[in-house]
């Protein structure tokens, strides 16, 4: 019985020793050896802002980093060009730490079109630290990060799509609003209609009711939320109370939900505005 127990203990000990050696074998003789990588391969979406920066974390996978490390990277244009838009020194430094950030500065005051580019980790200043990690030619760790910088200019040409359900029957209306930028504001616009001229006729079955347009103001806020305020006749101050929604700075798509006081039967209208 004692022999069996001793053998079992030795066998278990051997298994744990083997696993430990597999996990830490690359660091056994040099605790500063390892690799650098991005946290993940997901795309970074940035809304252009004057004087803004883009910060992308880079991770050093090594037990210690007493000697410091420099990692170079390249920028490859995918859509549009970073020239005159992005400034970078193409080096990220690890001063004793195991995580740092690539920081790129945004140039100019505006960006007319969305641009995309790849940031690729290319080399390190120490031979014992590799770029990424591969196994039998397969990349195991991400070393390329896609960056998308979205234009900070707003569109004033949209196609609208409205959906409302009244008495259990859904109704859909496509329309095109007239949009006017409000003077003195860069993110507030006046709309001739916020749900389309044909929505009320569609809901009522009466083509003559195409004058209930739901005019108003739409504001795109700093956090990309949307605020809608209706323009009302003083005699009917609660006909168009407004609503709220969201704005996608890259696609420029606007979505919002409108409340209404035109019908006594309460319902809301969901609207999607797609840029032309």
Image (cartoon, rainbow, N blue to C red):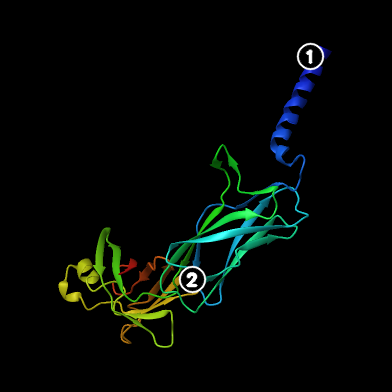
The kind of secondary structure element at disc 1 is helix
Along the polypeptide, which appears first: circle 2 or circle 1? 1
Q: Residue furthest left?
A: 207
Seen from the viewer's position, the closer of residues 144 and 211 is: 144
Residue 178 placement: quadrant: bottom left
Q: Residue furthest right?
A: 2
Quadrant the N terminus occupies? top right
Nearest-to-viewer mark from 2 and 1:
2
Residue 4 numbered tag: 1
Is residue 257 found left or right of 69 in the rendered image?
left
Residue 106 placement: quadrant: bottom right
Label 2 crowd (10 A; few <14 / some 14-19 / many >=20): few
Q: Residue at x 29, y 66 (%)?
A: 161
The kind of secondary structure element at disc 2 is loop
Q: Is residue 264 visible?
A: no
Identify residue for label 2. 83
Quadrant the C terminus occupies? bottom left
**Is residue 91 positioned above or below 182 on the image?**
above
């Amino acid at each position: 019985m004692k022999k069996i127990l001793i053998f079992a203990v030795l066998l278990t000990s051997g298994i744990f020793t083997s696993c430990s050696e597999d996990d830490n074998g690359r660091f056994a003789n040099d605790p500063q050896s390892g690799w650098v990588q991005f946290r993940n391969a997901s795309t970074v979406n940035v809304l252009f802002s004057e004087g803004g920066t883009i910060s992308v974390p880079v991770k050093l996978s090594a037990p210690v980093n007493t000697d410091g490390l420099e990692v170079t990277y390249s920028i490859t244009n995918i859509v549009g060009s970073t020239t005159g838009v992005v400034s970078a020194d193409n080096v990220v430094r690890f001063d004793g730490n195991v995580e740092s950030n690539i920081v790129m500065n945004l140039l100019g005051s505006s960006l007319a079109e969305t641009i995309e580019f790849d940031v690729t980790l290319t080399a390190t200043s120490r031979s014992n630290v590799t770029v990424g990690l591969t196994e039998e030619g397969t990349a195991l760790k991400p070393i390329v990060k896609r960056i998308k910088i979205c234009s900070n200019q707003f569109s004033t040409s949209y196609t609208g799509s409205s959906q409302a359900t009244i008495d259990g029957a859904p109704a859909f209306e496509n329309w095109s609003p007239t949009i006017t930028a409000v003077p003195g504001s860069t993110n507030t616009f006046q709309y001739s209609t916020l749900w389309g001229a044909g929505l009320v006729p569609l809901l009522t079955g009466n083509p003559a009711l195409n004058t209930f347009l739901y005019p108003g103001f739409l504001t795109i806020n700093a956090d990309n939320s949307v605020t809608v305020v209706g323009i009302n006749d003083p005699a009917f101050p609660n006909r168009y109370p407004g609503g709220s929604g969201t704005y996608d700075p890259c696609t420029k798509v606007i979505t919002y939900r409108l409340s209404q006081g035109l019908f006594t039967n309460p319902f809301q209208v969901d609207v999607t505005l797609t840029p032309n």
